[in-house]
Amino acid sequence: MEGSPHLNQVPSEPAVKRFRILWRVFLLFNFGLGGYMFAQGGKKERAEKKAIEEPPPAPPTTVTAPAQEEPIIITPVERPVPVRPPVPEDQQREIFKWILEEKRKAKPQNRQEKKHIDEEKAILKEFIRSETVPKI
């Protein structure tokens, strides 16, 4: 038992250095597999395009006059825009207060940005203090 290494003993070299060759083989194999899969996907798409482009051979036995079919015209269905009820004033004030708090938390990068944020905060304060709130 004295000659055997202890289980808790730290190896002298890091695992990456000891298994450098295995890492390289693993990475090369993965790159090769990815390239192969990428190339096979392109072959499959080209084969499908060729199959679609080649028309099937027409049967030469009987010749009939082509039937006149009316083209099918599909009109897009317009969905009605849902009309939402107006937001109550007290809820609008709460939204404005929340926006104002978020503007206060914002950290401007330069003077222009700070000036812009201050202007927005002033407008929000006016909305909050006013008797009537503009419609959203």
Image (tube, rainbow, N blue to C red):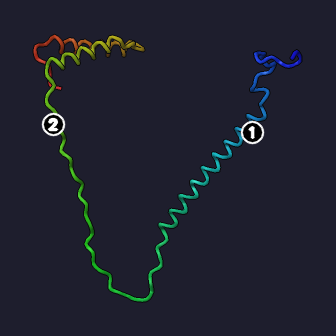
Residue lying furthest front:
1
Q: Position of residue 105 (x, y in %)?
A: 35, 11
Q: Is residue 56 left or right of residue 63?
A: right
The one nearer the camera, 117 or 78, is 78
> In the structure shown, which secondary structural element does the residue marked by tag 1 occupy?
helix
Q: Position of residue 6 (x, y in %)?
A: 80, 16
Q: Residues within 10 Å of mark 1 (few under 14, many from 20)?
A: few
Q: Position of residue 26 (x, y in %)?
A: 71, 38
Picture residue at 75% right of the left edge, 39% below the top: 25
Q: CA distance from mark 2 to mark 1?
A: 62 Å
Picture residue at 55% right of the left edge, 63% below the top: 47
The one nearer the camera, 17 or 80, is 17
Q: Which residue is mark 1?
A: 25
Q: Quadrant of residue 65?
A: bottom left
Q: Position of residue 14 (x, y in %)?
A: 76, 22
Q: Which residue is mark 2?
A: 83
Image position of 80 with respect to 70: above or below: above
Image position of 43 with respect to 55: above or below: above
The one nearer the camera, 70 or 4, is 4
Q: Amino acid at mark 2?
A: Val
Q: Is residue 11 left or right of residue 47?
A: right
Q: Which mark is residue 73?
A: none
| Disc with the residue nearer the chain's start (2 vs 1) | 1
Q: Amino acid at mark 1?
A: Val
The answer to the question of whether label 2 and label 1 lie on touching residues, with beta carbons closer than 8 A, is: no
Picture residue at 41% right of the left edge, 13% below the top: 110
Placement of the N terminus among the 4 image quadrants: top right
Q: Residues within 10 Å of mark 2 (few under 14, many from 20)?
A: few
